[in-house]
């Protein structure tokens, strides 16, 4: 088992200056390695029946592709030519080159997303991949060539876990250390068991469950947009690359970080709340990237449903709750009680079935249908109908008494 714990660190002024210098050195080495890959590709673009009007052999024809092994072996001689590289720990430089080739392999696998240049100040993290001893000692974390850095160890590292690697991040809110801890413990993946619920997400209500729980919609970006708008207006009036421009830019960056932190904290709390309600959770397998291209795209991106789904799966695995995705097509147009099609427009917020006269909130009905499909997917055909029937009848009684 490998877990990532994020802690706030407080390097002093000298350590911050040294870290920023390391970031810039890693950025330059990243771009240099990317330049070698681009030169290799550019030297082989010209067709064999054409002259070199389009491209020339920047490298010899028998020159091998600058892979990870070759570029990593070029680091020791490069330190003699560029003494600046000696200040950075050797393993940090190696993992920086590894990052480039991970992006290159990802591009080759999916066919798009060619690695881009890192602009000044854009590379904001470095990785220390290996430690001989435990670097976390009380109130400090010991990093190579940097020394002891003060850390806020707000939660202790569990017994039986060892520190594998440490990634140092720079954000507008401050400095952070992501500590990867590992253990030989193997936890089996959860299986469908216990009480099952379906979860439907939306903009009017952030999520609704098949048990009738409805979480009100949240607009993280819109709530704090008034303050962000003022900061962006002040930034637009500053002269670019001036000291005041940099101060205003940092304030805008800090506000964006604050919005992201508020959203992520809310989603973690909501994921734990859902895991308290059930032992098995079924979600819809919708592609939210397509949903974000509609006329409500800005609000969809602000809600970050994809991130919430990933967080719910992570929290469920740690707590032994089975989380799976089911087919979402037509879930809001199907009656969860008699399973016939009931067409509804977007403004229709109450599900009313003309066949079985079952009435419930539209989002709750969609969540119940997702629960139906999840139970059909993971249980025997002879048992799932009884559980769903009892669930719908109980909700129908609650809904009738509420009216």
Image (cartoon, rainbow, N blue to C red):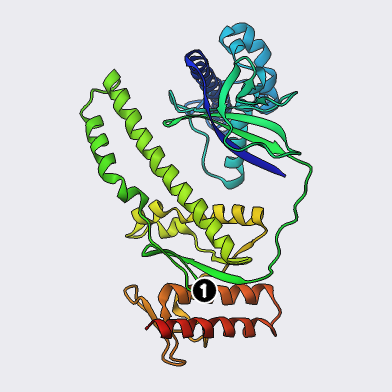
| Quadrant housing the C terminus | bottom left
Q: Residue at x 50, y 72 (%)?
A: 367
Residue ID for mark 1: 211
Quarter of the image for residue 206 reads bottom left
Which percent across, then down, holds residue 52? 51, 25
| Depicted 301 relative to depicted 214: above or below | above
Q: Residue at x 23, y 22 (%)?
A: 239
- 17 horizontally vs 163: left or right: left
- 334 horizontally vs 44: left or right: left
| Depicted 94 relative to depicted 206: above or below | above
| Quadrant housing the N terminus | top right
Which percent across, then down, holds residue 27? 51, 22
| Depicted 178 relative to depicted 376: above or below | above
Which percent across, then down, holds residue 154? 57, 36
Can residue 134 be spotted in the picture? yes
Can residue 335 be spotted in the picture? no
């Amino acid at each position: 088992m490998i877990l990532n714990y994020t802690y706030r660190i407080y390097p002093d002024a000298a350590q911050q200056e040294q870290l920023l210098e390391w970031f810039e050195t890693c950025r330059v080495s990243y771009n240099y390695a990317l330049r070698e890959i681009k030169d290799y590709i550019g030297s082989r673009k010209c067709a064999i029946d054409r002259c070199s009007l389009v491209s020339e052999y920047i490298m010899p024809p028998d020159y091998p592709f600058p892979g990870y092994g070759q570029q990593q072996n070029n680091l020791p001689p490069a330190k003699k030519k560029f003494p600046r590289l000696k200040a950075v720990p050797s393993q940090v430089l190696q993992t920086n080159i590894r990052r480039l080739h991970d992006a290159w392999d990802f591009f080759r696998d999916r066919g798009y997303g060619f690695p881009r240049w890192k602009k000044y100040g854009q590379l904001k993290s470095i990785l220390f991949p290996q430690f001989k001893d435990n670097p976390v000692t009380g109130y400090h974390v010991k990093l190579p060539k940097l020394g002891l850095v003060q850390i806020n160890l707000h939660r202790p590292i569990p017994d039986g876990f060892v520190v594998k690697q440490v990634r140092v991040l720079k954000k507008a809110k401050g400095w952070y250390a992501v500590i990867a801890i590992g253990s030989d413990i193997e936890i089996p993946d959860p299986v469908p068991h216990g009480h099952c619920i379906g979860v439907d997400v939306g903009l009017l209500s952030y999520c609704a469950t098949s048990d009738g729980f409805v979480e009100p919609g949240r607009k993280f970006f819109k709530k704090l947009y008034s303050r962000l708008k003022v900061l962006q207006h002040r930034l637009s009036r500053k002269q670019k690359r001036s000291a005041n421009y940099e101060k205003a830019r940092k304030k805008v960056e800090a506000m964006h970080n604050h919005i992201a932190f508020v959203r992520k904290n809310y989603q973690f709390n909501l994921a734990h709340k859902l895991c308290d309600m059930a032992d098995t959770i079924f979600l819809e397998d919708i592609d939210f990237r397509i949903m974000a291209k509609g006329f409500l795209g800005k609000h969809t991106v602000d809600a970050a449903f994809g991130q919430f789904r990933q967080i719910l799966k992570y929290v469920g695995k740690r707590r032994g709750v089975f989380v799976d995705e089911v087919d979402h097509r037509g879930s809001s147009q199907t009656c969860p009680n008699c399973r016939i099609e009931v067409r509804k427009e977007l403004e229709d917020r109450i599900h009313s079935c003309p066949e079985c006269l079952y009435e419930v909130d539209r989002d709750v009905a969609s969540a119940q249908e997702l629960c139906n499909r999840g139970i059909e997917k993971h249980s025997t055909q002879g048992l799932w109908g009884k559980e769903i029937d009892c669930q719908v009848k109980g909700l129908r009684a609650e809904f009738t008494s509420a009216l």
